[in-house]
Amino acid sequence: MPHTPNFEDIRYFIEVASTRNLSRASERLGITQPSVSAAMKRLEQSFGTDLLVRHKNGVVLTKAGEVLQAQGLRFMTDWAKLKSNVCQANSEMAGTFTLGCHPSVALYTLPHILGPLKTKFPCMVFNLVHDLSRKVTEQVISNEIDFALVINPVRHPELVIQSLLFDNVTIWCAESVDCTEQQTLPLYCDPNLKQTQQLLSSTSDFSQQMIASNNLEVISTLVANGLGLGILPERVARRAPAPLATYNSKIKPVQDELCFIYRADKQNHAVSVQLHREIKRLLES
């Protein structure tokens, strides 16, 4: 069975073709002449043809040897480029990544970060995935998403969690309407959120009819139109189509933390740290 050429055999041949001498090639390669001769024989067996004509003063390349020398040099150059590109892929700000976040988070973060990130890191491309923070976090853990912007992520041994900013969640009403006049109107909220449960448990005199909605933008729009109260993060409330005001200043807000997360075993640490630093700077500016 013919021997399959390996990288070192071709590298040795390039040196022999350059020096036209087995002894000189072995010296420059730092190996023994018998090792060089064995490599030449393996190559000739692999290609099924003579590559060298040996004589007492050195070697002469056959036509096949000349072809191997020319294409072998290109191979070595391509290999060097390939090796460099593979190494750089894990250390440079380049490549295509998936970025996950809640739709509401996306609305108050992505317009501020995607443009500047593209300008600073033109070789980075982000595909976007939107879902609940809990589900996005699960997708990062399962290697379906590269990076994510999530609210209050649950600690996990395979996650790196880096803080970006804080937000306050409280009960809001339309600024144009006296909040005391809205006490008979419904409260729009997502009852499954811990923030909702914490707020409702913190006040004993809250007896509004509760209407469930898991879309914060819908809630903010309904509240802005004077149709009731709503439990919202402040950054979402500030984006409502009409100004909102806090319903009761005596109700202590619940704090949210927006974090940048990724798997430490998947993403290069230096790249991830730099990306986190830049996103944090953009959101704070």
Image (cartoon, rainbow, N blue to C red):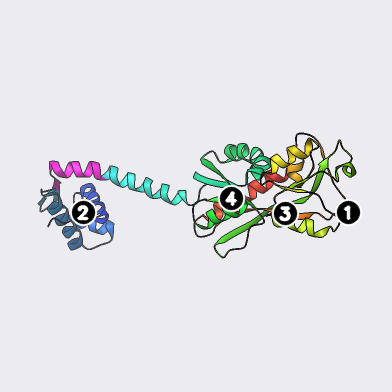
The residue singled out by tag 4 in the image is 148
Tell me the CA gap for discs 3 and 2. 60 Å
- The part of the image, by quadrant, that contains residue 36 is bottom left
Chief SS of the magenta region = helix
Mark 4 or mark 2, which has the lower sequence index? Answer: 2
Could you tell me how far apart the alpha carbons at marks 2 and 1 are, in whole angstroms? 78 Å
- The amino acid beneath tag 3 is Asp
Tell me the SS state at disc 2.
Answer: loop
- Helix, strand or loop status at disc 4: strand
Label 3 vs 1, first from the N-terminus: 1
**Foreground pick, 177 / 104:** 177
Q: Position of residue 128 (x, y in %)?
A: 55, 42
Q: Tags 1 and 4 in contact by the CB under 8 Å rule? A: no
Element type at mark 3: strand
Residue located beneath label 1 in the image: 250
Q: Residue 71 in magenta?
A: yes
